[in-house]
Image: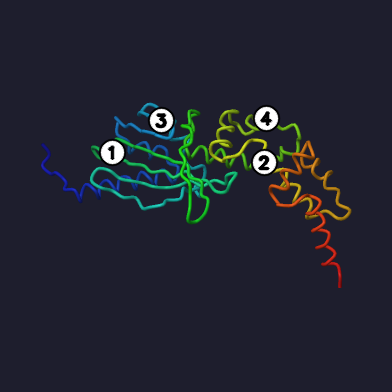
């Protein structure tokens, strides 16, 4: 029997200090440091993936979800709180979805035993941020693709950067298989991200990128503006798809939008 048994306040302090040190290692991408805080009998319960990770697989699991850069941080929604042998962390990861902002709101309950982290219970829910005062919480289909909320956020960034830098949408024959391959993910993973997380189809995502490209071209165009030609140059392969996307985004027909640009240009040119 130990000579000294810490009281609740001392144990709470020790738990909070341990979890904070572990968290700082995570923030600085020190995987060896992170692993050093785990108990040999660690079990990591990831309820988003419906998965339990033991000591043998934990290093690989954590490495896939660690921050990619020192300046990349999750947004904490509360400070680290501790009570006895358990600490609690809450944070969120926000992405741009098809209907506005979406975020993963995540909480972790971390239990300490023998001065090491013995259990982690991680819960995540997907929230559609509709307004400052009203939001809708949904429980997406459980991810069976081996992707945590952190990994899904990285995938969304990879997809966005690929579209911005490579402009694959300019090819009217662009398909999901090609995008997945060039981004380094599987077709099912990209499909899950778009449909279940961002709330839009692949073709809607692509057409939005094409429309943004076209609107940027319109800002630089000089009369006479041939908007159908600009649409095909942006990757649209049918006028009906273009007109539908354009009206949905701007609330106007392409013809009315171009007329508005022309009137504005004349007003600026007049003395």
- Examine the image and state in which quarter residue 39 appears: top left
- Of badges 2 and 1, nearer the viewer stands 2
**Which percent across, then down, holds residue 201?**
62, 36
User: Which residue has dot 3 on it?
Assistant: 50
Residue at 38% of width from left, 45% of height from top?
Answer: 23
**Which percent across, then down, holds residue 103?**
49, 45
User: Which residue has dot 4 on it?
Assistant: 178
**Which percent across, then down, holds residue 10?**
20, 50
Callout 2 touching callout 1 (CB < 8 Å):
no
Which residue extends farthest right? 224
- Of badges 3 and 4, nearer the viewer stands 3
Residue at 39% of width from left, 39% of height from top?
Answer: 123
Real-space CA distance between mark 2 and mark 3, rounded to the nearest whole angstrom: 32 Å
Real-space CA distance between mark 3 and mark 4, rounded to the nearest whole angstrom: 30 Å
Q: Secondary structure at mark 4?
A: helix
Residue at 75% of width from left, 31% of height from top?
Answer: 173
Q: In this rendering, would 14 be left or right of 249?
A: left
Residue 167 marker: none
Q: In this rendering, would 163 be left or right of 75?
A: right
Of callouts 2 and 1, which one flags the residue occurring earlier in the amino acid sequence?
1
User: Which residue has dot 2 on it?
Assistant: 163
Callout 2 touching callout 3 (CB < 8 Å):
no
Placement of 104 over or under 189, stated as above or below: below
Residue 116 marker: 1
Callout 4 touching callout 1 (CB < 8 Å):
no
Real-space CA distance between mark 4 and mark 2, rounded to the nearest whole angstrom: 12 Å
Of callouts 3 and 4, which one flags the residue occurring earlier in the amino acid sequence?
3
């Amino acid at each position: 029997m130990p000579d000294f048994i810490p009281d609740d306040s001392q144990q709470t302090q020790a738990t909070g200090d341990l979890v904070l040190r572990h968290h700082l290692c995570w923030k600085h991408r020190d995987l060896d440091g992170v692993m050093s805080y785990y108990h040999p009998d660690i079990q990591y319960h990831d309820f988003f993936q419906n998965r339990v990770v033991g000591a043998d697989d934990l290093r690989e699991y954590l490495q896939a979800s660690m921050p990619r850069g020192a300046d990349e941080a999750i947004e904490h929604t509360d400070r680290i709180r501790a009570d006895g042998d358990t600490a609690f962390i809450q944070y969120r990861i926000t992405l741009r979805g098809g209907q506005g902002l979406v975020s993963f709101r995540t909480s972790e309950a971390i239990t300490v035993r023998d001065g090491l982290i013995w259990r982690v219970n991680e819960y995540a829910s997907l929230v559609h941020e509709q307004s400052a005062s009203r939001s809708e919480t949904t429980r997406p289909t459980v991810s069976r693709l081996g992707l945590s909320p952190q990994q899904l956020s990285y995938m969304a960034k990879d997809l966005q950067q690929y579209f911005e830098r490579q402009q694959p949408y300019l090819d009217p024959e662009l398909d999901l298989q090609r995008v997945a391959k060039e981004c380094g993910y599987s077709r099912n993973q990209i499909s899950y991200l778009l449909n279940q997380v961002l709330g839009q189809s692949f073709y809607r995502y692509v057409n939005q990128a094409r429309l943004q490209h076209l609107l940027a071209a319109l800002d630089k165009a000089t009369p006479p503006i041939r908007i159908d030609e600009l649409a095909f140059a942006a990757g649209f392969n049918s006028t009906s798809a273009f007109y539908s996307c354009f009206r949905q985004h701007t609330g106007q027909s392409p013809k009315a939008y171009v007329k508005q640009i022309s009137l504005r240009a004349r007003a600026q040119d007049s003395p």
